[in-house]
Image (cartoon, helix red, strand yellow):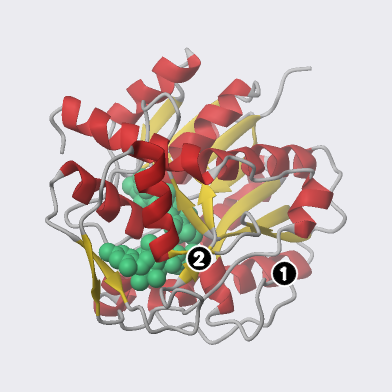
Amino acid sequence: MTKPRILVTGGTGYIGSHTVVELQQAGYPVVIIDNLSNSNREVLDGIERITGTRPDFVEGDCTDIATLRQLFADYSDIKGIINFAASKAVGESVEKPLMYYRNNLDTLINLLDLMAPNGVEGIVFSSSCTVYGEPDINPVTENTPIKKATSPYGNTKQISEDIITDFIHSGAPVKSVILRYFNPVGAHPSSEIGELPNGVPNNLVPYLTQTAMGIRKELSVFGDDYDTPDGSCIRDFIDVVDLAKAHVTAIGRMLSGKSESAIEIFNLGTGRGVSVLELIDAFESATGVKVPHRIAPRRAGDIEKVWADPTRANTILGWKADTPIADTMLNAWHWQQRLRQRGIM
Ligand code: NAD
Ligand code: UFG
């Protein structure tokens, strides 16, 4: 049976591009909309080299409802949406809150508004473990209490979850799966696509691979006096391809009418907490490349430790993040090397 078309917003971005690869490999026709504010067109070449298919692409902004109306008119066969399009830099969101609220919330509201009139049945939404803040107990389940957001970015995720919930509770004839990602890292094993941070990376793995490459002098480990076994923070680092695969499972389940309720929420993590120092060790062992690093003061606003209980996703979606951390680190390193070969970084 032919699979329904999926609209992937933000599909040239980091997680979006990996998801488009998995969707196409599973037989879904895809159309991407992206305004290229944090990605570029060459990503489409990478997707095509991996899958043999170039996804349809609309360069456009999801906050512009006229653009979306036109897209739905041009693609009347869209049955599902995966909404990645958002601004995601925590620090920038503190500086430019209105930009974050406008971009992330207008995008979601426009999409929800246009679903039913255009025959779209379901939407998968990219949320984040940031909604749990600093949890009292780890690992966190989907029922762990939501804490007040510590940044406008985090607040857009909480508000987005509320908007989806209120909309569906109003009786709107659509379904949604909310996916709370832990820390996505790594790159496609082909090294054709990966993460392309703008400027100096804020996130650990791109900073680490750039340091290993000699682009950065040393990696600062933000704090070694936390209440953790080695004193550095603990996260649940999930391989981006594992994460991408969960979207294929989630949208398939939703569109084939198997959801238990109109809104389902899943944590997407490995269930394994890894400290910052352990991750550096894992990179060095996997690649044989040393990463110059030093202990630096704590970074303001950091969570001490958070990792997922992914039991719901494991049992209900039948999905599991099982890429070994060594493979993830190798893929991240190969991607960094590919960027160097291509003269990008
Ligand atoms: P990304 O920046 O690589 O991808 C987002 C894409 O959306 C970019 O290509 C950007 O150009 C596009 N975009 C932004 N605003 C747009 C708009 N108004 N219209 C059209 N396109 C727009 O980010 P990512 O890491 O792939 O994240 C994808 C989603 O997952 C985001 O919603 C993010 O908040 C969420 N998320 C990411 C992480 C993470 O650590 N990477 C963790 C939790 C949740
Ligand atoms: N870290 C360092 N040195 C660095 C960069 C990071 O020690 O140069 C540490 C941080 O202090 C933190 C850990 O590595 O302890 C992970 O930091 P990241 O910035 O990679 O990730 P965060 O967990 O802080 O945040 C990420 C995303 C957020 C998202 C959150 C939860 O950046 O957008 O995961 O999904 F909200």
Q: Which mark is residue 142?
A: 1
Give the x, y percent position of residue 203. 33, 60
Q: Can the viewer see residue 70?
A: no
Picture layout, residue 214 above or below residue 327: below
Q: Can the viewer see residue 284?
A: yes
Decide which of tag 1 and tag 2 comes sooner along the chain: 1
The C terminus lies in which quarter of the figure? Answer: top left
Q: Is mark 2 within 8 Å of ligand 2?
A: yes
300 left or right, relative to 162: left
Image point (60%, 30%), residue name: 76
Residue indicated by mark 2: 235
Image point (31%, 81%), residue name: 298
Image point (54%, 61%), residue name: 236
| Residue in front for this viewpoint, 247 or 270 | 270
284 left or right, relative to 11: left
Residue 224, image quadrant: bottom left
Q: Residues within 10 Å of mark 2 (few under 14, many from 20)?
A: many
Which amino acid type is marked by label 1? Answer: Glu
Give the x, y percent position of residue 300. 31, 83
Give the x, y percent position of residue 84. 48, 50
Give the x, y percent position of residue 55. 46, 24
Picture layout, residue 152 above or below residue 269: below
